[in-house]
Image (tube, rainbow, N blue to C red):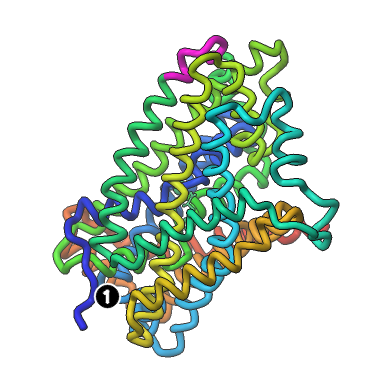
Amino acid sequence: MKRSEWGSRVGFVLAAIGSAIGLGNIWRFPYLCYENGGGAFLIPYLVALFTAGIPLLILEFGVGHERIGSAPLAFRKIGKQWEWLGWWPLLFTMFGIVLYYSVVIAWCIDFLFYSVKLAWGADSEAFFFKQFLQVSSGPTEISTIRTPILFGLLAVWALTWVIIMRGVSKGVELANMIFMPLLFVLTLVLVFWSLNLEGSMTGIVAYLKPDFSKLMDPKVWVSAYGQIFFTLSLGFGIMITYASYMPEKSNMTGSALITALVNSGFSLISGFGVFSILGFMATTQNVPVDEVVKESIGLAFIVYPKAISMIGDFGPMFGMLFFLSLTVAGVSSAISIVEAFASGLEDKFSINRKMLATLLCFLGFTGGVIFTTNGGLFWLDIVDHFINNYGLVLAGILECIVVGWFFNLDQIRKHLNKVSKIQLGPWWNWIIKLFLPLSLSVILLNQLIRELT
Ligand code: PHE
Ligand code: NA
């Protein structure tokens, strides 16, 4: 059977951008910025982007394209003993990340409908925790399933199922060709709209005003590297799989650069929107901007709804656009996770794609049910914490070591240079072989020590 292929380079790049841009860009990034020294966070963020994000994305694109395989197959083609390295991040993302990620998208779908009548009323915080989530007292206290969330989840998985069933070019590529332009338009509209709200400048100042003392705090650097991994979907084998669908001659290094820059540009721009809203809230309520933000989840589901209620006649419209853009960004990331796993199984067992899509989406939906219960928020925090702080970075380190030291890395570099316009020098080898394993290990250890003490 012939291996699936993208119909065009634009389709491939949009799909990679679709995986990269997600819930992480729209609320996680601005919040991290704010927490870690405002504008000063952009320094570690950009350092992490250029020293780790871009070189690793190039590596993943190179491995997938040169070896022609989903992550497990690509690693198997590097050496039989490395196949597991392709499997375990896929298992982690499929049974870790996507299960709760799809539930957060389900919240977005629910809030899309709630926006129509501003259903959260005067107290958006009480609405979110007490009425919507009905949060219990701890992770082991689970008594009900929240029906609206369950329905939202069903919608997410049904959509994902349809897209994956249709295959790489008619499904994933087509979906992203529609979703990404739509997302860019929605975001631009929202950002301009927000910038015009009263008090927006107060928020922008809080966003960009640097607090350089934070640069001495290792936690800030850990957050920056963690965010770059998450935001570029690195370490999961997703980008390897997507690259493997690209026909032989294609500027892969260029595609990696475009993907990385568009993703971070999107984060920076949507940050202007988010902080304008915070400034608007702070001004209207006459409080400092810090008092408006509490936690990242709260930003989208508590602070935004509150702001929407205060905007006036156009509030419902604003809310619908915002939650629609979150939904679109989220779904295009969720499908990349399922596609990468399906592709691994397809390469290994040559099972029919339609059957795989059905099986995986069914498992995804049923597995996600735990997060739709009243104890779901606790589970979400637990899983998110371990996967993001340890899983990804560890996968990145192993990837660099295996490809860098147990395989001829120059073969990947030569291949990339042959097909791409941009040429990688030997410096790239040293980033992958030495700099990344060392610096990422320091980050991982730092995180571990902080947690244990
Ligand atoms: N990159 C996505 C985001 O920023 C998250 C994601 C993680 C997507 C893992 C796919 C795989 O939201
Ligand atoms: Na992202």
In the picture, measured across the screen, residue 426 lies left or right of residue 112, that is left
| Residue at position x 29%, y 39% in the image | 181
In the picture, measured across the screen, residue 97 lies left or right of residue 251, that is right
Label 1 sits on residue: 68
Is 195 contained in the magenta span? yes
Q: Identify the image quadrant of the N terminus.
A: bottom left
| Mark 1 surroundings within 10 Å by alpha-carbon count, few (fewer than 14), some (14 through 19), many (20 or more) | many
In the picture, measured across the screen, residue 84 lies left or right of residue 287, that is left
Q: Of residues 294 and 152, which is closer to you in this image?
A: 152
Which of the 4 image quadrants contains residue 192?
top left
Rendering coords of residue 299 (x, y %): 62, 34
In the picture, measured across the screen, residue 169 lies left or right of residue 18, that is left
**Depicted 379 relative to depicted 190: above or below:** below
**Depicted 269 relative to depicted 223: above or below:** above
Which of the 4 image quadrants contains residue 96?
bottom right
Rendering coords of residue 172 (x, y %): 31, 59
Q: Of residues 1 and 212, which is closer to you in this image?
A: 1
| Residue at position x 33%, y 81% in the image | 352
Q: Of residues 238 and 409, which is closer to you in this image?
A: 238
Give the residue type at disc 1. Ile
Is 1 contained in the magenta span? no
Q: Mark 1 near ligand 1 (CB under 8 Å)?
A: no
Which of the 4 image quadrants contains residue 52?
bottom left
Element class at badge 1:
loop
Rendering coords of residue 275 (x, y %): 55, 25
Q: Does residue 366 appear in this view?
A: yes
Q: Does residue 89 appear in this view?
A: no
Rendering coords of residue 203 (x, y %): 57, 19
| Residue at position x 77%, y 48% in the image | 135
**Depicted 54 relative to depicted 244: above or below:** above
Boundaries of the magenta span: 193-201
Q: Identify the image quadrant of the C terminus.
A: bottom right
